[in-house]
Structures are given as structure tokens and as C-alpha cells.
Image (cartoon, grey):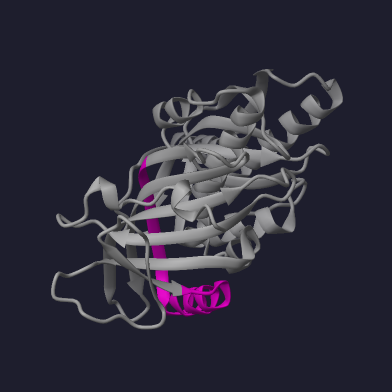
């Protein structure tokens, strides 16, 4: 009888842990009390479900959680390859406002890889975005807070700070889109006439180049250009053949155009690690540059994406900046 009671007690404890609630509250930054309460309940429900699903080893159940189809699909895709759980039972953070929406940062999570192929950090932070109706519009892992605060400190005005926050949110989104294999989101953020260029070091003995190659004055790199359609089609094939894709960003730098208002450049180092369904792996290390147009704040667009390899032959002088594309 004593043994049976112990088993029952342990079972009850297990059920309690399985359904343990995670709560979220705002510390400030939001004045609409109704919106505040709605988001607190909604985010609490999401974080609780994340922990419950991770404990049970199952897919996420979004019943009762107000979340857009896009955000639901992205998080479900990420969850299929990499799981995590909230480290704190009670989370209290400020509400941040960007150009279009609201944002919650610094929710500590512990990554729970499904196998030994995961090479990233175990302890990360989650960022949640929501709209004016309190609906969750995005869930993603964040860059470290020190990098975030350092980049935000460069804002020269309220408008500049808003744009910087929007760009940095995109950087986090952009990384998540690869993890999620979210092709439609990547397609939407690029302008229809976006220039996609891939660089290689210009060799001294190079005497010719193809019609697809372009040179930028002062750069010792030759760039091969693609259209947005070509880039998306190539990326579709990459997503199809790879079981998972892990992209890490570091050394992020925001650069304002010297003469054109609302034009920003994002320069960062990208480390790519992927594994195919057939077991093959691929890794590369390079610098990515993004030219961002904020003339329409509600619908910002990327006009240029470039990649060039990290190499001893590539100096900082060869890295692109907004002023290299003044004619766009």
C-alpha cells in the first residue's frame, strides 16, 4: 500500500509539472490597460504551452492562443527541428514599440536539441512580437542583449531609434526564416527588383568576367548578381534538400547612408551550417550586407543583399556600405 501511494504521489507530481504554468507580466511601456492584460494572458498561454509540449515531447497546440497563421507556421517549423523551454516560471519585461508593432524581449529559454547535430548555444533569449489587437505576430530567438543595446545606442533621433529596432527585429527574423525554411517570408521582405549579389576575391590573373558579374569601384571583390526570382528559386531548392539549416549572425553593424534619408545598411557576419536528408553537411562563413529602404515606414524593403567570403584576402575596405549603392 505504501508503495502504491508513493507511485500515485509521483504521478500527481509529474502531472503537475507537466502542466506547470509560465506567467508573463509587463513592467511598463504599454499604457492601454486592456491591451496589456490581453497580451499578458496570451503570452503566458504561449510560454506555458511551449514548456508543456517540450516536457511531453509533442508538437505545439495553439488552441486558445491568439497567434497569426504566419507566426504559428514559423514556430511550428522551428519546433520540428529544435525545441526549447522557458527557464523562468515568472517573466517580467518592458514593452517595446517599433515601426509597426510591439515587442517583448529577454525571455530566457533553454534549447533542447532533438539530436547531437545542434551546435548552437544552449541558453538563449526569446523575443515575441504582437500587433495592436494583442495577437502574436512573431516568435524568435534573439541576439544577445549586449549586442542589441550597443546597436540601439547609435540612434540619433526617435525616428532613427524606431528604424534601428525594426531593422534589428528583421535581422532576428531573417535568421529564424532560414531555421524555419520560411520561403514566403523571405520573398515578401525583398523588393521585386532586389539585387542579390555573391562576391569572390578578384584574382590578380583574372582577365575576363561573365556578363552576370559586376564590379564596385574600390573593392577587390567581383560580384555575381541574381534577380530576386533566381535567389528565391535557388533557396527553395536548398530548403528542399536540407533536413535542417542553422544560421548564426554576429558582428552586426548598422550604417546610415551619408546623404539619403531613411536608407540604412546592415553588415553582419553569417555562419551557415546545414545537413542534407542524405546525411551530407555544408558549412560556410561570410559577410552579409543588406540595403534597407525606410521611405515607406509601414512597408520597408530590402533592395540589396550581398554575400562575400571570410578570407584572409578580404579586408574591411572590401566590405560593402550604403554609399556603394547611391544610384539605386
Please name the residue shown 52% across and 53% down the image: 174
- Give the image quarter of residue 242: bottom left
Q: Nearer the viewer, residue 221 or 169?
A: 221
Q: Residue furthest top?
A: 27
Q: Is residue 244 magenta?
A: yes
- Position of residue 97 relative to residue 201, above or below, is above
Q: Does the image show residue 96?
A: yes
Q: Does the image show residue 7?
A: no
Estimate the x, y position of residue 127 in percent, counting from the top left.
56, 38
- Position of residue 115 relative to residue 8, above or below, is below
Q: In the figure, is residue 53 to the left or right of 269?
A: right
Disc count in the image? 0
Estimate the x, y position of residue 33 in percent, counting from the top left.
83, 21
Region of the chain picked out in magenta, as a range? 226-251
Please name the residue shown 57% across and 77% down the image: 229
- Position of residue 179 relative to residue 53, above or below, is below
Q: Nearer the viewer, residue 23 or 202?
A: 202
Q: Nearer the viewer, residue 250 or 273?
A: 250
Estimate the x, y position of residue 293 in percent, counting from the top left.
62, 49
Amino acid at each position: 500500500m505504501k508503495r502504491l501511494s508513493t507511485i500515485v504521489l509521483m504521478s500527481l507530481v509529474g502531472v503537475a509539472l507537466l502542466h506547470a504554468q509560465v506567467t508573463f507580466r509587463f513592467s511598463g511601456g504599454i499604457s492601454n490597460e486592456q491591451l496589456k492584460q490581453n497580451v499578458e494572458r496570451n503570452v503566458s498561454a504561449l510560454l506555458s504551452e511551449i514548456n508543456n509540449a517540450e516536457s511531453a515531447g509533442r508538437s505545439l497546440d495553439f488552441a486558445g492562443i491568439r497567434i497569426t497563421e504566419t507566426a504559428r507556421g514559423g514556430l511550428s517549423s522551428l519546433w520540428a527541428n529544435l525545441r526549447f523551454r522557458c527557464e523562468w516560471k515568472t517573466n517580467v519585461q518592458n514593452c517595446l514599440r517599433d515601426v509597426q508593432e510591439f515587442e517583448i524581449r529577454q525571455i530566457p529559454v533553454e534549447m533542447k536539441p532533438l539530436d547531437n547535430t545542434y551546435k548552437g548555444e544552449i541558453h538563449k533569449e526569446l523575443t515575441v512580437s504582437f500587433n495592436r489587437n494583442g495577437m502574436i505576430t512573431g516568435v524568435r530567438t534573439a541576439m544577445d542583449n549586449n549586442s542589441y543595446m550597443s546597436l540601439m545606442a547609435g540612434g540619433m533621433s526617435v525616428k532613427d531609434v524606431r528604424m534601428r529596432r525594426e531593422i534589428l527585429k528583421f535581422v532576428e527574423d531573417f535568421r529564424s526564416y532560414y531555421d524555419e525554411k520560411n520561403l514566403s517570408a523571405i520573398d515578401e521582405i525583398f523588393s521585386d527588383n532586389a539585387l542579390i549579389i555573391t562576391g569572390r576575391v578578384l584574382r590578380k590573373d583574372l582577365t575576363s568576367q561573365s556578363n552576370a558579374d559586376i564590379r564596385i569601384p574600390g573593392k577587390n571583390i567581383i560580384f555575381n548578381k541574381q534577380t530576386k526570382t533566381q535567389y528565391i528559386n535557388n533557396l527553395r531548392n536548398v530548403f528542399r534538400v536540407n533536413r535542417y539549416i542553422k544560421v548564426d549572425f554576429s558582428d552586426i553593424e548598422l550604417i546610415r547612408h551619408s546623404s539619403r534619408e531613411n536608407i540604412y545598411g546592415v553588415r553582419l557576419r553569417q555562419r551557415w551550417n546545414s545537413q542534407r536528408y542524405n546525411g551530407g553537411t555544408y558549412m560556410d562563413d561570410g559577410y552579409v550586407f543588406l540595403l534597407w529602404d525606410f521611405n515607406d515606414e509601414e512597408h520597408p524593403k530590402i533592395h540589396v543583399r550581398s554575400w562575400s567570403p571570410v578570407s584572409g584576402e578580404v579586408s574591411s575596405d572590401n566590405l560593402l556600405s550604403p554609399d556603394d549603392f547611391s544610384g539605386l
